Image (spheres, coloured by chain):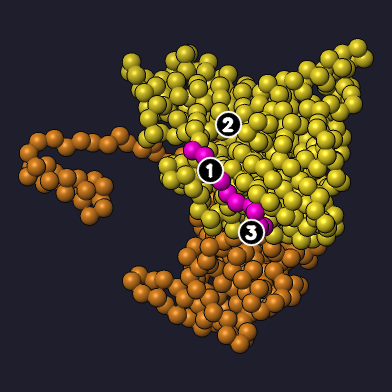
Amino acid sequence: MDFTLSEEHRLVQSTVREWATTRLLPRAAEMDRAGAYPREFIRELGEMGLTGVFTPEEYGGGGMDMVSYCIVIEEIARAEAALAAVLSVNNSLDCYPILAFGTEAQKRKYLPDLARGRTLGCYCLTEPAAGSDAASLRTAARRDGDGYVLNGTKVFVTNGVEADVLVVYARTGGEGPRGISAFIAERGDPGLRVGKIEHKLGIHASSTCEIVLQDCRLPRDRLLGEEGKGFTVAMATLDGGRIGIAAQALGIARAAMEDAIAYAKDRRQFGRPIAEFQATQWKIADMATRIHAGRLLMYRAAWIRDQGRRHSLEASIAKLFASETAMWAATQAVQIFGGYGYIQDYPVERHFRDAKITEIYEGTSEIQRLVIARHVLAAAERTLESPVEDCRPARTAHD
Amino acid sequence: MNVVVCVKHVPDTEAQVRLRADGRGVDESGLNFVLNYYDEHGVEEALRIKERLGGTVTLVTAGPARAVEGLRAGLAMGADAAVHIQDQVVAGLDHIGTARVLAAAIKPLPCDLVLCGKLATDDNAGIVGPALAEFLGLPQATAVTKLELGDGRRATAHREVEGAVETLEVRLPAVITVERGINEPRYPSLPGIMRAKRTAITVRRLADLGMSTPPTAHVELLQLAPPPKRQAGRRLEGEAAAVVGELIRALREEAKVL
């Protein structure tokens, strides 16, 4: 067992950390207030290959593994969490399904631009009445000649306002998961428009909106994967996405901890820095412990995925633990800052607001527990030493 | 045009440096090392020359095993090849010795231009580049802020000197040391990192360079000492007129900044 990062992983880490510290961090507060990010950031990230970390080099991507992806997202989120969401969606939720389920022609058409940051992707699964119960989605895709006509409304679409390439889930058959198909829509497709733009608690700099499909006609070659297999595409995509959210959450948790440490060393009360009080030290110690634990869970889930093995359980465990760590660590950081933690002059109130979304999107904490419980309960009878290693039950509707 | 860039793997300038117990070096445990900042500018300049005129960019370093990470960082930026002079005597070399060793490694390489950083941020000496030019028998220009390569036989180098820009013309091949204003180094890209991983790094021992004995040291490092701790600030109180007089006296006589 070797827990050290490889030479290239360390180089990815130092490179992204350098970019995030010099370019992104100084703009973070301003981005949060403005609710937007500089568009040139996407170009810069694209030139570095960070918009297509695990997209193979032959499709214009970075050609790296999932561990590298975790490193990238954590470092970006440590500086500013909304841009990590933008990147995470483009990498995990757009490049990945096209790479894993797309035809060669679809890969050649979409991936090079997505991977180089020349276009941006989004993922349209959730609907007003279909959130955690994604299999109940109602957006309809009706066969029409040599194509499909889509009707419905998607909500909470990250990157929706700017996206050029949209992965959309719609119902081509009967009820339940088997009636769902995945499609690739493009900005400018007739009948596709951006609806209501949401005003969120956190990750302000990334856009979140409705995508309205009104008699949106897509040619047949926009079907992603087989007809009726869309739910498989969606769930396989979310497995990887969840590892990315774990990375984002850990970046936020680290930001909270690092900012709290700097403040605690500087802030003096009762004649000494508050870092010398045990009340502060224990909070910091617990933050560090949870962050270390979360990072091990994340790297392990990523490593299992890199081995080409099933990782739904490990992805859910990592995402659940990391996101709850982010929320908890941000809460502790605000407490350490006291009144200064509650005002916008200091960054921890932003971390506090940004952290919350990680417990909600790409599967709420409740859904992660549901996935984990199903796997663990199904495997309990044949568990010997490692319950995590050994449980490989058949896929369920929610994993 | 074939460009050779000399690079050094140095402690991150933001890292807290602790001295070794014997006081003759820094404690490297837990210390983060990076490509010398000025050398990054050298690599960037070489890459821009290659993009404009074609040719190759070869990195050369003399350093311990960990220095390979500095070479990989330069390769990830886009350099084509790297030579690592790795020999146990390298750690004991002074600046002149390092320049001799680098010169021996560069001599057999196809080379129209040698670029170095103006100095390395660990010891701030700025000796290796100029000494290297002497040992290679090449003309040199130091602390260059702009480099123009005309017909490939001559280069025009701009240097910022007190209140003016000095323009030099040098015959190529030449050794140029670069100042930070010369360009903005690019970040390594992920495809670059993957390519760097696949690039074989040539390891050379002193014997491979035709040096049977290490170069004689001219300088012996006796001791390193941490800089004195920063003094607390002093607040001058009283009437403005009196305080200003005292402030000027203190700035002139104590701080010696006026």
Q: Classify residue A344 as left or right of residue B11.
A: left
| Residue A305: quadrant of the picture | top right
Q: Which residue is mark 3?
A: A188
Please determine whether, in this image, residue A229 is positioned above or below residue B131: above
The stretch of residues the image draws in magenta is A189-199
Q: Are marks 3 and 1 on the same chain?
A: yes
- Lower sequence index among marks 2 and 1: 1
Task: Chain A: give its colour.
Answer: yellow
Q: Position of residue A291 (x, y in %)?
A: 62, 26
Chain with orange colouring: B
Characterize the local packing of mark 1: few (<14), some (14-19) or many (20 or more) Cα atoms within 10 angstroms. Answer: some
Q: Which mark is residue A196?
A: 1
- Lower sequence index among marks 3 and 1: 3
- The type of residue carrying mark 2 is Ile
Residue B232 visible in image: yes
* Nearer the observer, B56 or A182: A182
